[in-house]
Amino acid sequence: MDNMNIEGRQAKPFLKWAGGKRWLASSYIHLFPETYERYIEPFVGGGAVFFHLSPSEAVLGDINQELIETYSAIKTNWRKVVEILSRHQKKHSHDYYYRVRSLVPSSKIERAARFIYLNRTCWNGLYRVNLSGEFNVPIGTKTTVISDDDDFESWSKKLRQAKLIQSDFEILVNEAKKNDLLFVDPPYTVTHNFNGFIKYNERLFSWQDQERLFHALCRAKSRGVKIIATNAFHESICLLYSKKFELIEAKRFSGISGDSSYRKSIEEYIILANIG
Ligand SMILES: C[S@@+](CC[C@H](N)C(=O)[O-])C[C@H]1O[C@@H](n2cnc3c(N)ncnc32)[C@H](O)[C@@H]1O
């Protein structure tokens, strides 16, 4: 079955997300198979690849409850969410941001609009919570809450093709069957970290989780699931995967500056099984 919805290709995601895969969707999309049954993504985050491919049947999961609730609100009631976002846009200021940040509304739709508002106006679109689970990212420099190229109706349509599940990744990986396409983009934890940012993630996603993911992917591979995964370009990842999976080194440049002396080369692994 051809699971690609041609009409809906190349849509950008509506959330800014750390580790977002827009670069993969634009430069490495040829690696993705033309045909598959269901599209399953257990670490959906901002969903760059999902929104780009726009598959006709998908299962999307993430451990982040607020994120999955937001997708579900856009799926079922995007107009109401946009209405509330316009209110946030009108009222946006330094004090308003911190007031919204400090109050979690009881209505699901209000919570979704708050999530999108904070994502778009916080520092660098970062998602971070304190030990009590409260969002604690400071205000950023961006003040645009709704922009002209937002198309919530189309994002909602795409999400209507998807089952949304808040859960640990293993449930979704285990659910994948022969000829389903599994796109797996976990937090990049490696065995030896020197990077404070990854260290923060480490609390959420340990090296034991990376090993648990590897074993779940080995089982999925032997069931005939088509697998595309990404991970850190690090020897610990190479050691873990190289015997059972095909590894590609994906090189890209961070587009921070037009001046080539400031452009940093970034490498990541793309990990494949049962593709092609
Ligand atoms: C690198 S991000 C995914 C980015 C996404 N591909 C994009 O384009 O925006 C990793 C995601 O994994 C989620 N996550 C962390 N631990 C998880 C777990 N145990 N099970 C499922 N999701 C998890 C995080 O909430 C985060 O959204």
Image (cartoon, helix red, strand yellow):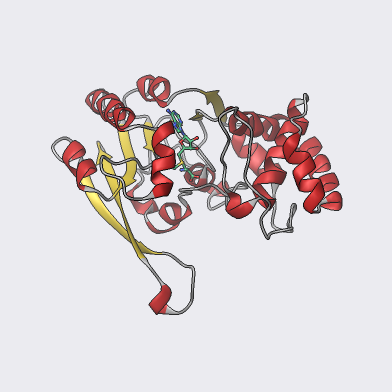
* Residue toward you, 243 or 157: 243
Q: On the rendered image, what quadrant is the N terminus found in?
A: top left
Is 103 left or right of 276, judged from the image as shown?
Answer: right
The image quadrant where one finds the C terminus is top left
Residue 19: x %, y % from top left = 45, 48
- Asked whether, in this view, residue 237 is left or right of residue 121, the answer is left
Residue placed most toward the observer, 192 or 175: 192
Q: Position of residue 69 (x, y in %)?
A: 64, 28
Q: Quadrant of residue 253?
A: bottom left
Residue found at x 60% / y 50%: 125
Q: Can see residue 181?
A: yes
Left/right placement of residue 122 relative to residue 93 reads left
**Residue drawn at 30 percent across, 47 percent down:** 270
Looking at this view, is 129 or 231 the one in front? 129
In the image, 50: left or right of 81?
left
Query: Which quadrant would residue 136 be assigned to in this image?
Result: top right
Q: Is residue 143 above or below residue 102?
A: below
Q: How far from the left and from the top, in percent, is residue 15? A: 60, 46
